[in-house]
Amino acid sequence: MAEETQQMDDLTLISDVETMSKDGVTFNTEFMKENETFMDRYLGNLYGDEEVDRSKILSNDVEDSVNSYLVSLARVFLGSGEIIDFEPLNPDNEEDVEEADQKSKYADWLVRGQSDSYPTQYGALFDILLMKFGVVKYFIEETKGIKEESYTAITPEELVLFEESLEGEDVISTEIVERSGDFNGVDPIDFKFKVIRKEKKIKVMSIPPECFIISKDARSKSEAPVVGDDTPITRGELVEMGYSKEKIAQIPRFSGQKDDEGNSRLDTIRDREQGSSSKPWYAPTWASEEVMLRTRYALIDYDGDGIAERRYVLYSGQVLLENEVFDHVPYAIGSSLLMPHRAIGRSIGEQASPFARQNTTLLRGIADNIYAVQAPRIAHNELVNQDDLLDQEHGATIRVSGNDTIPANAMQAIEIPYIGDKVMQVLQMQMQRRADTIGTMITSQGLEADDFNKETATRFEGVQDQGKGKVELVARNIAETYYRDLYDGVIWMATHYQNTEQEIRVLGKPLKINPGDWKFDHAADVRVGLGSGDEDHVVETMSGILNLTMQLEAAGSPLVDQEKKYNTITSMMKGLGISNVGKHFNDPSQPDELVLAQNEILTRNNAQLQQMVEQLSNQNPLAEAEKVKQQTDLAKAQSSAQLDAAKLAEEKRQFNISTTQKQNQNDQKVAVELTKLELDSGKDVEGSIV
């Protein structure tokens, strides 16, 4: 007899998910302490073992190393060049190619084109370089979109049809805000409507490392038993999300500190510079009180069938807010240096921290030595006045008593040897070791001007290439893991949950995206040039390609065309940091732009010919007849160009009509097939004719 399955209750589900979360890296004290150490070193906080009246100077190796990498990675990932591209599975299928291009542009806009994209991505790169990992979360955010629409000369019948068209799940309310009068049964009137719709938009948000949850020793996010985050949120925000006030009132208020097992100082260290060491606990109203919202994507056997499935569980305290099957983990995780068989790797900050500690000791030794050389200790006998000797005022007198009138016989400075020059040699060795390990070093470190001038180009290029190679490795790691995962993820989210059309701007032009129309699978491919963000090299390379293209074009070669030239110019413009290519060059794939350009060329040629004819007429009266003939030819050419433009516009219109007709025929065919299926099965089928 088969064992009867039993579904978990809410409290059991929350308890089990909490137990799984406590096994995450955030609750690993040593793991989080290391991240706290990296943040302390970056901000230049003291170690805590400093001695009174001794040097407290700090070596900023961590800050230098992270900022050096951050400059290069910001050029690579936050510039105008593409990062990830979606490749069509069938390049010969125009629909497949167009959809892949749409996904590439939409994903890039979601990740880098929104108003808060730059701080989000900058923060993620900073965490990836300094901490053991950086992470962002992508999710669907429901918002209310308000739009006013005006219509003129509407009849009562048209008004009824319009109101019926607004009856949908996404429409919250409609309201007539203006009307030109009342229906008299004959004359139509004007209306202005205010329509409020629910809009689902994809949001990308950076998650602080101390708030992120992932199981220990996880090989990847897809294999981790639990992944999630803890985010403070106000009760009022939960009400806006649609949860009842009665349910929210049962959630305990967040005091500003996480559970003892997961307490981290990272947020305290960050906020210390702004004068805050802990989060404020006071809230003036119930709606502004904070609670801790816990989001989990857990592999758990909720229904008791013996198989663990991935579930989206949202709760706070002992109150369950969401619980559903969700076969995706919407986080992108990145580390500077990957560790095989581990989801979390190592960071540049982790590599630089030991050098910061060692170099701090050396620098403090030099400083203490200088202080000792400047103020040496004094050996003296009983003839020296003790109070005078201890007086540190500059130029103070030291009295000596007794019959001996020579002060040197009563006291003598103990000579302290200066060791700064020797320690500097050790520091120079440390800098070289740091460069070998991390890849960041000023090339002229420790060299005099003459010595630098004697350096050979080969040695300089060797050091430069070695440093670039390390930066490129980190950039490759980030591109192939974090950004590939993020671009794939936002497209997965759009495909499954975005039900509204989105208008974006690409290269300065509007582009409408509707993920509901997508029907192909595409693989994400890394497109970013990982040469440490060397835009000059990109521009130089593309310029060479453009020159070659023009030479082939002049020779009549079929290897190039206007579109290939435009693609090369686009790459050059992006290398220059100019994303709006349309401001400077026409796109040959857009007929409207080409018609305008051709008309301008024709007008310019006509003006030149007219000028030539007038010059000939002035030189030879007999050329008047030729002038009339030329003007006639110009008029014919102008008329021909206008006819060509009209023909092109008509062909475009006919193409649109043909496409619409084919789509309607296809819809009718599908409806007939669905009707046949309905009749055969005896069940209602959505989309059938009857």
Image: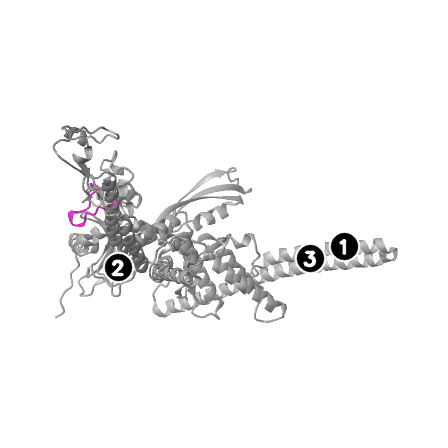
What element does badge 2 sit on?
A: loop
Q: Are marks 3 and 2 in contact (CB under 8 Å)?
A: no
Estimate how packed mark 2 is, as few (under 14), some (14 to 19) or many (20 or more) residues with alpha carbons within 10 Å. Answer: many
* Upstream in sequence: badge 1 or badge 3: 3
In this rendering, the answer to whether 328 lies above or below 395 is below
Mark 3: secondary structure:
helix
Q: Single out the residue that lies furthest toward the right.
A: 622
Check residue 37 for magenta coloring. Answer: no
- Identified by mark 3, the residue type is Leu
- The picture places residue 301, in percent across and down from the top left corner, at 19, 61
* Residue at horizontal 78 percent and vertical 56 percent from the top: 612
Depth order, front residue of 406/492: 406
Q: Earlier in the sequence, mark 3 or mark 2?
A: 2
Q: Is residue 510 above or below residue 469?
A: above
Relative height, residue 293 to residue 8 (above, below)? above
Contact (Cβ within 8 Å) of mark 1 with mark 3: no
Residue 602, numbered circle: 3
Labels 2 and 1: the sequence-earlier one: 2
Up the image or down, 530 lies above or below 29; here it is below
For the point 24% across and 51% down, which residue is it?
A: 357
Residue at x-position 63% and y-position 56%: 597
Residue 344 bears which disc, if any? 2
What span is in magenta? Answer: 255-267
**Quadrant the C terminus occupies:** bottom left
Task: Please give the residue where the numbered disc 1 appears in the rendered image.
Answer: 610
Rounded to the nearest whole Å, what is the CA distance between mark 2 and mark 1?
73 Å
**Nearer to me, 277 or 472:** 472
Q: Residue at x 85, y 55 (%)?
A: 619
The amino acid marked with disc number 2 is Ile
